[in-house]
């Protein structure tokens, strides 16, 4: 635990003008001063900047600025030093190597944040937000991560917990001071609206966190359609025009994502449709099955049709399937003679042409509209941002729903309190706060009792 | 003269400690300032109450006196929280302030190995941090192997009324002047606490006609699981409910600066759950009225206790206040209300066995440990007595866990969190309260009591009988089928309960929310005692919740089982937050579980400590 760790904090090696090498731990100052020309550095006061050279023996490696931050007012609550050096792979790496040679350990991914958490600098939710922030690709993503960081999510959850603890305190007062009938008596009837309100808030949080996850992970879009309707050219038009970003979406999706673009701050990941892009001699049946499978994996499917032809049996089947999920129909080739029949569907239909670049903007707007993300950049982003949080919120919601059900069945309040309390604890775990004494304090601050 | 156990103080803690020590065969001395005051109830005339009633049953299960003596000394008894569910039901009895102490004394006098002596103890014989006996105020030394201090509110006590402060114990009894200073000398940390008691009013001066009656239950109850009830439900005394009014409030607010609480005279910390009436008015300005209860203290004399009206106002203001209340216009005050300040020790300096961490062989129990309440005191008293005796017998101490008893929760809270106000037990402090019920106190604790040797063979047999009956009753429920005859269907129809589609067992039927044990008895009389049936009903109806609680217990036990070696050097555990390090150093928890409950020790500190234990002590 008392390792002194170092790593390169910037990740544009070779391209940026300046890079930062960071070191944290009890030996941070000592290690840096052993390779730093500025002799005043070692005993300098905290939170000061020092100019000098990084040296290996007599050889000068780089001209640098060194930021000295002593414990405890640092990110990790340990002594920390940041070396601002010149960009370039060789120099930056050499400085890191020197630190490691002089006694630092190479930091594991996320270890600075882990130290910050273990040393009580940040709570679990904040730690998670930091990792989101580090991985953020768009400004919306980083805004969402920041809102977790500044405690916006925490505040939302705290308010909800406050409501629950008030209810619990009232129940406990009724139990522990049964003779004080002047205090509000919790009954089967008056508990219901409060529970319903809590349940609703939780439901909203969970629903909105789905949007949160779309912002974080992007929208996975599948483009399907019969051979030769223009799937590839639609994909290429979308990607080319938006200057596709290099994808390294973590782990699972990397292999299947063909390319990504950013629209309105939202990442759209186009799934690899290679399997059904092969055209000529493919058996139509297989094409339909593969399309369906792909549609299942996607958040949104664009079904491309040829406006110059009438609908095939398979296309009609795909439209039907698509109606049960998020989808958009793109009728291509409208620069040619329209031969396609009118489609009777609830799905939005965009007409356009990849050849003449008609309808592409409209299509992108429709994608964003479909998810209600149009005004996203102005929204208050207070969503839960990861699976652990969503799971805890869902568990809390289920518990409250159970309480509502049991209350209908005349289950006594001491039993109901068990599940309300677990729900309250779940939310506490989400924000890393869970003190039993909160409840007892609440009882005495809100009620007037005693001999 | 040398004793094995010396108990200092004859209050509710001292009584249980002395009785159980002597019962277990050890030569025991109980020293108290006034023999007449043994078992006295200086404040409210009741035993039990929410959570407290469960503690009384636990004391009874462990072989103590409070429950069985209360059973023969009360004039009203009721089950609280009946409608709020089985986990929180609890008995309260209006105990007679004359009869109860008399019956206690009778019990103590008939306990073999127990000597009672009237004297003031002002110092201890301590050598090398080991207690060897006590020193009386005249300098006489009495040797004892174990000393249990149960001094209540008597250490350097001051009585406060208005602007006068008098050096005195409760009701003008002599206080102990030197003992707390001497304890400080030996390294115990002393804190100043405060509590209070309301006025007593002469019965003949009260006009009860305008008051709301509070009566006892029309079912028979006992605290003790060994004895049948021996009172007449029809001869129970009534209590009364009244309210404060704007006139009362004006008198209090106009004279606030005369109250000892507000004039700066009081330095001790009072309990939040037991505020004075002036406190209530200041803190809850918007409340139009406050509830008060009039309770008779005894059937042998005339005083009535005005619960909810504790104050440290001067006497003339107290008179005005009382006479502003409806029905008390002509009230004659027989005892004025007062606040009392006293010295207590810091409970963080005691071990879960209630032995001091500072002085070996010294145990403390009751208000000296920072608690409040007769039941809380008695609960600690019996544990201290058992543990002093077990230590003499070279046995491991009895440490009740949070999932075993309210007394366990109480002691764990005290020695883990400490307290800066008098600690009162609440059901909400017990996270596993669903399995710490009044009805299963004997099932939970009698096996442990047997192991400790604190109950008689008959008492143990009573437990075995009950256990056997519950098992048989369960078989009955599982084997008895509800045959859907037209007669049975009619019973269902009469109660407006849907008839089941198939023949179900009583066990499965009872799981349905709308079906009660009373209803099943209509279908077929259940051949077991009511108490056994009730036990079954709880176990079957709330099985899901009970299972959930046991799962939580399991989680806790995992951490509880990770013992922290007593020789651990916290300065060697790197990266602990400094507050956590200080707290751990001071409290020295016996397990990782206990460490998690220390305020200021965060989950990250526990993680660090866990890693350290694994590394240093090869914990799994």
Image (spheres, grey):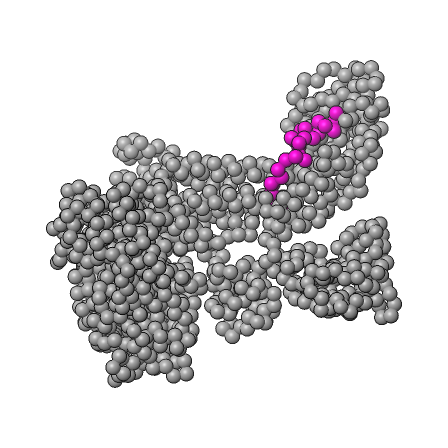
Q: Residue furthest right?
A: A59
At horizontal 79% and vertical 67% (from top left) the residue drawn is: A38
At horizontal 59% and vertical 58% (from top left) the residue drawn is: A120
> Does the stretch in magenta take in B525?
no
User: Is A374 positioned to the left or the right of B3 in the image?
Assistant: right
- The answer to whether residue A56 is visible is yes
At horizontal 82% and vertical 21% (from top left) the residue drawn is: A333
Quarter of the image for residue B199 reads: bottom left
Up/down of A288 relative to B147, above or below: above
The image position of residue B578, as x and y in percent, is 56, 65
Pick whichever, A198 or A64, lies toward us: A64
Quarter of the image for residue A284 reads: top right
The image position of residue B461, as x and y in percent, is 27, 63
Quarter of the image for residue A377 reads: top right
User: Is A352 positioned to the left or the right of B200 in the image?
Assistant: right
The N terminus of chain A sits in image quarter: bottom right
At horizontal 44% and vertical 37% (from top left) the residue drawn is: A194
User: Is A69 positioned to the left or the right of A242 in the image?
Assistant: left
Q: Which residues are magenta?
A: A362-389
Up/down of A407 relative to A130, above or below: above
- The answer to whether residue B59 is visible is no
Pick whichever, A361 or B210, lies toward us: B210
> Does the stretch in magenta take in A370?
yes
Number of on-image labels: 0
The image position of residue A69, as x and y in percent, is 69, 61
The image position of residue A105, as x and y in percent, is 73, 64
């Amino acid at each position: 635990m008392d390792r002194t760790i170092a790593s390169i904090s910037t990740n544009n090696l070779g391209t940026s003008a300046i890079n930062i090498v960071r070191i944290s731990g009890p030996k941070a100052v000592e290690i840096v001063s052993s390779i730093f020309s500025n002799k005043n550095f070692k005993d300098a006061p905290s939170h000061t900047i020092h100019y000098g050279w990084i040296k290996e023996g007599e050889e000068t490696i780089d001209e640098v600025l060194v930021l000295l931050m002593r414990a405890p007012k640092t990110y990790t609550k340990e002594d920390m030093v940041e070396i601002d050096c010149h960009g370039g792979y060789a120099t930056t790496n050499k400085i890191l190597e020197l630190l490691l040679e002089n006694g630092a350990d190479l930091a594991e991914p996320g270890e600075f944040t882990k130290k910050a958490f273990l040393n009580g600098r940040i709570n679990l939710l904040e730690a998670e937000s930091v990792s989101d922030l580090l991985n953020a690709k768009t400004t919306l993503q980083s805004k969402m991560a920041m809102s977790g960081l500044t405690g916006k999510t925490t505040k939302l959850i705290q308010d909800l917990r406050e409501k629950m603890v008030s209810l619990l305190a009232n129940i406990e007062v009724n139990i522990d001071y049964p003779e004080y009938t002047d205090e509000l008596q919790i009954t089967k009837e008056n508990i219901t609206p409060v529970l319903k309100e809590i349940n609703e808030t939780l439901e909203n949080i969970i629903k909105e966190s789905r949007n949160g996850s779309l912002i974080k992970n992007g929208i996975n879009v599948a483009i399907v359609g019969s051979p030769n309707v223009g799937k590839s050219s639609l994909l290429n038009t979308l990607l080319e025009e938006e200057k596709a970003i290099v994808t390294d979406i973590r782990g699972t999706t990397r292999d299947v994502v063909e390319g990504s673009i950013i629209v309105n701050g939202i990442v759209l990941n186009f799934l690899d449709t290679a399997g059904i892009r092969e055209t000529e001699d493919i058996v139509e049946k297989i094409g339909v099955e593969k399309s369906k499978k792909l549609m299942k994996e996607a958040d949104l499917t664009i079904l491309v049709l040829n406006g110059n032809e009438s609908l095939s049996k398979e296309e009609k089947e795909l439209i039907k399937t698509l109606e049960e999920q998020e989808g958009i129909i793109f009728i291509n080739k409208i620069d040619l003679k329209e031969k396609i029949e009118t489609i009777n569907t609830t799905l939005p239909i965009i007409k356009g042409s990849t050849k003449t670049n008609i309808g592409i903007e409209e299509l992108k707007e429709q994608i964003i509209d479909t998810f209600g993300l149009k005004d996203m950049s102005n929204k208050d982003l207070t969503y839960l941002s990861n699976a652990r949080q969503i799971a805890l919120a869902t568990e809390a919601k289920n518990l409250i729903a159970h309480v509502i059900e049991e209350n209908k069945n005349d289950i006594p309040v001491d039993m109901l309190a068990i599940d309300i309390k677990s729900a309250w604890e779940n939310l506490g775990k989400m924000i890393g706060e869970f003190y039993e004494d909160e409840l007892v304090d609440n009882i005495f601050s809100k009620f007037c009792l005693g001999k | 003269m040398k004793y094995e156990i010396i108990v200092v103080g004859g209050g509710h803690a001292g009584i249980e400690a002395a009785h159980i020590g002597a019962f277990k065969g050890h030569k025991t001395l109980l020293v108290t300032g006034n023999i007449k005051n043994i078992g006295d109830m200086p404040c409210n005339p009741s035993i039990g109450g929410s959570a407290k009633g469960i503690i009384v049953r636990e004391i009874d299960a462990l072989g103590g006196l409070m429950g069985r003596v209360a059973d023969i000394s009360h004039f009203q008894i009721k089950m609280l929280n009946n409608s709020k569910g089985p986990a929180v039901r609890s008995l309260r009895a209006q105990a007679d302030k004359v009869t109860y102490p008399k019956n206690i004394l009778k019990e103590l006098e008939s306990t073999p190995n127990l000597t009672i002596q009237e004297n003031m103890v002002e110092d201890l014989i301590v050598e090398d941090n080991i207690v060897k006996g006590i020193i009386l105020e005249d300098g006489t030394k009495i040797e004892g192997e174990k000393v249990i201090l149960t001094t209540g509110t008597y250490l350097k006590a001051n009585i406060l009324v208005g602007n006068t402060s008098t050096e005195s114990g409760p009701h003008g009894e002599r206080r102990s002047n030197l003992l707390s200073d001497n304890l400080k000398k030996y390294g115990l940390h002393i804190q100043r606490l405060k509590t209070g008691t309301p006025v007593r009013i002469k019965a003949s001066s009260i006009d009860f006609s305008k008051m709301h009656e509070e009566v006892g239950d029309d079912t028979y109850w006992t605290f003790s699981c060994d004895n049948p009830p021996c009172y007449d439900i029809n001869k129970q005394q009534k209590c009364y409910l009244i309210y404060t009014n704007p006139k009362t409030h004006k008198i209090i607010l106009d004279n606030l600066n005369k109250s000892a609480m507000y004039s700066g005279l009081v330095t001790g910390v009072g309990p939040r759950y037991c505020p004075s009436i002036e406190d209530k008015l200041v803190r809850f300005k918007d409340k139009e009225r406050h509830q008060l209860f009039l309770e008779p203290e005894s059937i042998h004399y005339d005083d009535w206790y005005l619960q909810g009206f504790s104050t440290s106002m001067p006497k003339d203001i107290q008179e005005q206040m009382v006479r502003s209340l409806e029905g008390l216009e002509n009230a004659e005050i027989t005892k004025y209300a007062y606040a009392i300040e006293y010295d207590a020790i810091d409970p963080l300096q005691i071990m879960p066995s209630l032995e001091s961490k500072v002085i070996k062989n010294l145990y403390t129990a009751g208000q000296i440990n920072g608690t409040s309440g007769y039941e809380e005191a008695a609960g600690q008293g019996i544990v201290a007595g058992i543990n002093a005796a077990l230590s003499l017998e070279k046995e491991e101490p009895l440490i009740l866990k949070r999932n075993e008893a309210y007394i366990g929760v109480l002691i764990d809270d005290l020695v883990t969190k400490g307290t800066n106000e008098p600690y009162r037990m609440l059901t909400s402090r017990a996270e596993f309260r669903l399995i710490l019920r009044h009805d299963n106190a004997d099932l939970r604790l009698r096996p442990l009591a047997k192991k400790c040797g604190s109950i008689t063979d008959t008492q143990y047999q009573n437990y075995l009988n009950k256990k056997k009956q519950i098992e048989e009753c369960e078989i009955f429920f599982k084997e008895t089928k509800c045959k859907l005859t037209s007669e049975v269907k009619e019973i269902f129809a009469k109660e407006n309960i849907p008839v089941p589609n198939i023949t179900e067992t009583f066990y499965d039927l009872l799981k349905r929310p709308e079906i009660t044990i009373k209803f099943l008895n209509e279908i077929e009389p259940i051949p077991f005692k009511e108490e056994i049936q009730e036990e079954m009903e709880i176990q079957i109806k709330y099985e899901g919740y009970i299972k959930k609680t046991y799962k939580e217990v399991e989680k806790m036990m995992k951490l509880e089982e990770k013992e922290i070696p007593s020789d651990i050097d916290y300065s060697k555990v790197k990266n602990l937050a400094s507050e956590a390090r200080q707290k751990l150093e001071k409290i020295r928890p016996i397990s990782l579980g206990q460490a998690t409950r220390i305020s200021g020790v965060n989950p990250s500190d526990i993680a660090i400590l866990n890693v350290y234990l694994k590394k240093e002590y090869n914990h799994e």
